[in-house]
Image (spheres, helix red, strand yellow):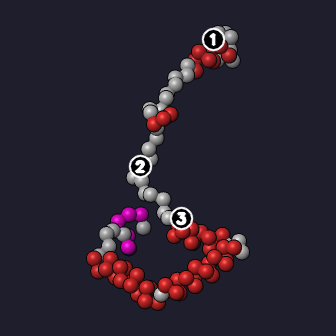
Amino acid sequence: MNGGARPGAGRKKKSTEEAQLTRRDKVLIVFTPDRWRECLEAMYVEIKNGNIKAFSAVAPYVMGAPPARLSLEHSGPNGGPIPVRHFDYAAALADATGGSDEDSAAPS
């Protein structure tokens, strides 16, 4: 299949979005605050034992997600413009080859 409509592509139906929102309510019925605490304590024990996957599962909730940015911002020193320097490659090559920027292997 190289093109055309793909299963699951496109905007979700409103009913799908509503169903996804009600999942959280269902989870909160099962995972009471005491059960969440038990789970986090078990994850903490795993983290202390060196389980990196357990840490990576918990870290975003503990540390907070980084802010989403639509674009990267770049700036030079002290927030100013990025300095742009011109380098004359022909002159440097001429200096390195004894005054000529032509290929020294060419027949004379």
Q: Residues within 10 Å of mark 1 (few under 14, many from 20)?
A: some
Residue 14 lies, in percent from the top left, at 27, 76
Instruction: Tell whether label 3 touches label 2 (CB within 8 Å).
Output: no
Query: Quick check: can you spot residue 107?
Result: no
Which three-letter amino acid code belongs to the residue tagged 3? Met
Disc 3 residue crowd, few under 14, some 14–19, many 20+, Cα 10 Å: few
Q: Nearer the viewer, mark 1 or mark 2?
A: 2
Residue 11 is situated, as x and y percent measured from the top left of the image, at 31, 69
Which residue is denoted by mark 3 in the rendering?
63
Mark 3 or mark 1, which is nearer the start of the sequence? 3
Q: Earlier in the sequence, mark 1 or mark 2?
A: 2
Select label 1 or label 3 by which is in front: 3
Answer few, some or many: residues within 10 Å of disc 2's Cα (few below 14, many 20 plus, some between 14 and 19). Answer: few
Q: Which residues are magenta?
A: 2-8
Q: Quadrant of the N terminus?
A: bottom left
Which residue is the site of mark 1? 100
Gap between marks 1 and 2 measured at Cα:
45 Å
Q: Amino acid at mark 2?
A: Ser
Considering depth in this image, is 10 or 21 the residue closer to the camera? 21
Query: Which residue is at a point 55% across and 82% down the rendered structure image?
Result: 37
- Numbered label attached to residue 71: 2
Residue 15 image position (x, y, % from top left): 29, 80
